Amino acid sequence: MTKEDLKIVFFGTPEFAVESLKRLVDGGYNVAAVVTMPDKPAGRGRQLQQSDVKRFAVERGLPVLQPVSLKDEAFIEQLRSYQAQLFIVIAFRMLPEAVWQMPPLGTFNLHASLLPRYRGAAPINWAVMNGDTETGVTTFFLKHEIDTGDVIQQRSCPIGRHDNVEVVYDRLMMMGADMVLETVDAIIAGTVKPIPQDQLLTAGQQPTPAPKIFKDTCRIDWNRPAEEIYNHIRGLSPYPAAWTVLTDADGNELTTLKVFVTGEPQPFGNGEHPEAGSIAADVKTLRVACGDGWLQVLSLQQSGKKRMDTDAFLRGYTILPTHRCR
């Protein structure tokens, strides 16, 4: 079988999936159809917006399927009509068994972690938030339980001390696209030897969860150690962004601040015992007390305003000694 003979149906929605789809199309692989999310209303006008994957597929003239329900019989029949031998899934919904078992060569997923670490919806965020120094990409065959299938290939990459989730995301997107093509080629050649994930766990080790990020997940708890908050902010920057509430001396909310970049954690000085959330500010700098040290905020966004460097923010907003971050 050649790559031209192998019919592929590609499932994906966000930008992360587009690079892999582009490599497949540009590489001459036979992408018979693309499945993505239905258009969704967005913005002030609530106009319908296409997914990144759909925009690319339309530009390249690929058939696009947008089922509301993946269990819909009409959709399943339409999918079956393409007679694809292989399905590829990247950043998409959980597929029902009737779908992922359809192609004779199987369905594989590209996941942005070194499985079984970080199973779930937000593996890149959690790897950075937890202060990991390494992550990677994995291709694996789908099975019923999410992110538990047998591993086909893995490749690791470092997470730098100052990397945020955007930097790591871009790095893994490119690395993952390379691996998708390598995985397809290995399937065509018949050289794939999948490894059960439990064989990749060391004694006593458990799979690491990577649940979906919610607004409350992003709120900064200034009682935590400065190192943990530093990583928390990197793992959410620039999106969805860590946030905190600025309050006055009576605890009244003044505004909400998103925090994108901080300096390295710094220990308290001799004799310093500030309350967590206390602020030390002058005309150019703003430091916030954590559980065991200071973090200097370098880039932020006030509610209703644009993102800016902290010195620009301080030129237009007065921070009083009685203000706190909560």
Image (cartoon, rainbow, N blue to C red):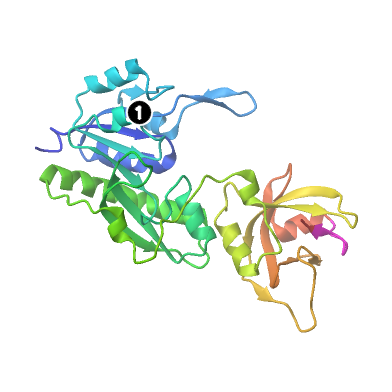
Q: Quickly name the residue at label 1.
A: 35
Q: Which residues are magenta?
A: 318-324
Which residue does the image show at 16% across and 34% down from the upper left? 6
| Coordinates of residue 227 in the picture (x, y in percent) | 60, 69
Taking the magenta stretch, the answer to whether it contains residue 294 is: no
| Coordinates of residue 107 in the picture (x, y in percent) | 26, 37
**Nearest to the observer: residue 98 or residue 174:** 98
Q: Quadrant of residue 3?
A: top left
68 left or right of 264? left
Which residue does the image show at 83% across and 53% down from the upper left? 247
**Nearest to the observer: residue 306 or residue 131:** 131
| Secondary structure character of the magenta stretch overall | loop
Q: Is residue 252 visible?
A: yes
Q: Does 263 appear above or below 34?
A: below
Which residue does the image show at 40% across and 40% down from the upper left? 91
Q: Circle 1: is it few (<14), some (14-19), or many (20+) Cα within 10 Å?
A: many
**Residue closest to the far front:** 204
137 left or right of 8? right
